[in-house]
Image (tube, helix red, strand yellow):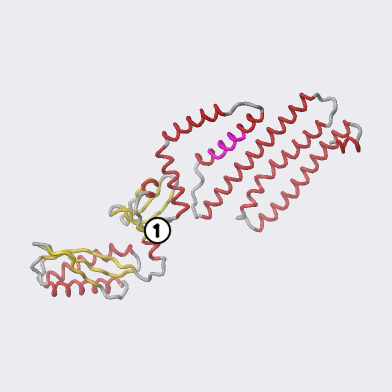
Amino acid sequence: MAVFEGIIPNEYLRFFIIFIGSILLANIIHFFLRRYLQRRTKETKEKVYLRLLSVAIKPIYMLAIVSGLHFALKSLSFLSKTVIIWLDNIFYISFVLVTALLLSNSIRILLRSWLRKQKQKEKVPQVIDKGIIAILFFIAGVIILDHFGVQTSPLLATLGVTGLAVGLALQGTLANLFAGFHIISDKPIQIGDYIQLNPEVVGYVIDIGWRATRIRTVENTIIIIPNKQIAESIITNYTSLSETKLEEITIGINGSISATANLQKAEESILQSAKNVQKRLKTLKSDPEVKFLQIKETNITFRVYIKVKEQKEKIEVCHELIKELKKNFGMEGIKIS
């Protein structure tokens, strides 16, 4: 400021030059940033830094003008020390609030960009979107109060207790929300995967939301499962298996015959039935296998192993094999138990 006083003795002229100069400088920066943004946006719309720049231009423009006005007013000698202090405080508040605005917008843009990279089409939930804004402006408020010498410890303690109470009240919702975040980031399942959570829940993932995941079964039934339950479950992802270098998947189908049956004849009949199914359904041409598992007083259990390309073929293979076994067992006189 002393440099300006030496060059421009008249304080009113000095005020005018500093203020108008800051406006001109702000507009020049704003103009070139806009031009650069428009040119780069035509080339590509997927650059994160372009979106960050687009939300930063206006706050930077406003801050430049406020800064110019602040320094211009401080150059006036007739302003009292109290007024100067208030000007400094107003500038400080403006700077903190604009910084909070920039940070909140930047974090939200980065979060949306991350979701797009994860191929997650769903928008950021309002509770997270508004929560980011609330947290950053709350921090800004605490910084401002601390600047004015206000004790913020009691306020922080009160808000901490309130936050704990709200967290307990929304425990289920928050658990599903964070579980959804885990599923999207860790990718144990993705949209289109064929998965099994338990014997009753088998099907295709059609949507992964922040609170729940939707699965379409083979019967075309939509099952909505809370994300917390999925995160805590043992998941069998058959799509991930088929996308590896494995060229085939072995499925096992159980059955049982009478304990008095001729095992050699039964084994030959089971293998022939499996081969007939393979030929009819045009599955992989590898030889099927049969293993006897357990013998009891009334029955002997067995398992047929057939290799297929995808786990979802199991239902159709099992359906056809049951029909084929029933027919062949009837012809061979083998009793099903």
For image coordinates 68% across by 41% down, the residue present is: 59
Task: Name the one closer to the observer, 139 or 132.
Answer: 139
Residue 148 forms part of the magenta stretch: no
- In the displayed structure, 264 sits above or below 298; it is below
Residue 136 forms part of the magenta stretch: yes
Horizontally, is 167 left or right of 309 in the view? Answer: right
- What is the x, y in percent for residue 201? 31, 53
Q: Which residues are magenta?
A: 131-141
Which quadrant does the C terminus fall into? bottom left
Q: Residues within 10 Å of mark 1 (few under 14, many from 20)?
A: some
Task: Name the one closer to the observer, 204 or 90.
Answer: 90
Horizontally, is 120 left or right of 20 in the view? Answer: left
Which quadrant does the N terminus fall into? top right
Q: Tag 1: residue type?
A: Asp
Q: Residue 77 lies in what quarter of the image?
A: top right
Residue wearing tag 1: 193
- What is the x, y in percent for residue 126? 51, 40
